[in-house]
Image (cartoon, grey):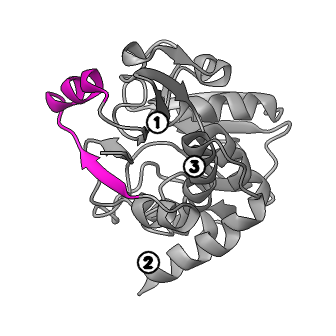
Amino acid sequence: MEYGLIGERLGHSYSKQIHAEFADYLYELKPLTREEFPIFMKRKEFRAINVTIPYKCEVIPYLDQMDPLAEQIGAVNTIVNRDKKLCGYNTDYYGFLYLLHKNGISVAGKKVLVLGNGGAAQPIFLALNREGAKEVLTVKYREEPGTITYERAAKEHADAEVIINATPVGMFPHMDATPIDLTPYQNIFAAVDIIANPLETRFLREAKTAGAKTAGGLSMLVAQAKYAVEYFLDIKIEENKIPPIEEKIAASMRV
C-alpha cells in the first residue's frame, strides 16, 4: 500500500473519495484488527497513511519523530514514511478549527462539554483552549481522573453552552443512537459532532430542535484531508478547494 487509511472498522469511511478529489494517487482503506495493527506498523510498507479509531494514540510508539503540534496533542492521524523513518502529524486539529470557523461557532468565554476523551478528542481540547473557551469538561460513561459522568454533567453543568461529540456513538450504521440526552441543557448555543457519516446525526437533529446552531463532521473530515495531502506530497493546497469537495461528497451521501 502506498497511501491509505488504517483503523479498526472503515465501512463508513469516505476518505478514499475525498483523497481522490485532492490528489492523483491510489488511496486504500485498510481495516486492521488489534493483532494485525502492530505487524503493519513494524513493516512500514507505505508512503503515507491516515489513522482513525482506535489507533490515533496507539501509533505513537512506532514513530521515529512527531510534529510539535502532534506531540502536544498526544494523538496522530497522519504518518509520512521518509526513508523508513515514520513522522507523525495531527491534521484533525486544523480540521476541527475549520469546522468551527466555517459554521460561525465561537467557543470564546463559553462552557463546553466534550463527549469522550480518546484520540479523536485530543486535538479538540487543544483547539478549545486556544480559541478561549472559559471551561472545558470531559464527559464519559465512567468517571476517571479529569472526567465527569453524563449524570454529573446533567446535574452540575446543565448550563453548558457548547456540546461536542467526539465519540463514535451515532455513526453509520448505528444512526438511531445518540451519546447524550439534551433535555437538561436549556442554555445550549451550539452542538458539534465530528461524525461525518451520517451527514446529520440524531444528536445534531435533537440539538437543532432545541434551537442550537449545529455542525456536522464532514467539513472537518474534508479539511483535515487537505492538510494530510499537503504532508503526503509536500505541496500546498488552497483552502478554497475544501467547500466544493465537501459538497460533492455530501451530494453522493444523499443519493
Front label number (1 vs 2): 2
Front label number (1 vs 3): 3
Identify residue type, mark 2.
Met
Q: Which residue is label 3 attached to?
A: 229
Q: Marks 2 and 3, how far apart in space?
A: 22 Å
Q: Secondary structure at mark 2?
A: helix
In the rendered image, residue 207 lying in the magenta stretch gets the answer no
First-in-chain label (1 vs 2): 1
Q: Answer with left or right where residue 212 lies relative to residue 205.
A: right
Q: Residue at x 33, y 42 (%)?
A: 6
Foreground pick, 208 / 11: 11
Foreground pick, 170 / 29: 29
Q: Residue at x 68, y 54 (%)?
A: 99
The residues colored magenta run 26-44
Identify residue type, mark 3.
Val
In the rendered image, residue 30 lying in the magenta stretch gets the answer yes
Q: Residue at x 46, y 49 (%)?
A: 180
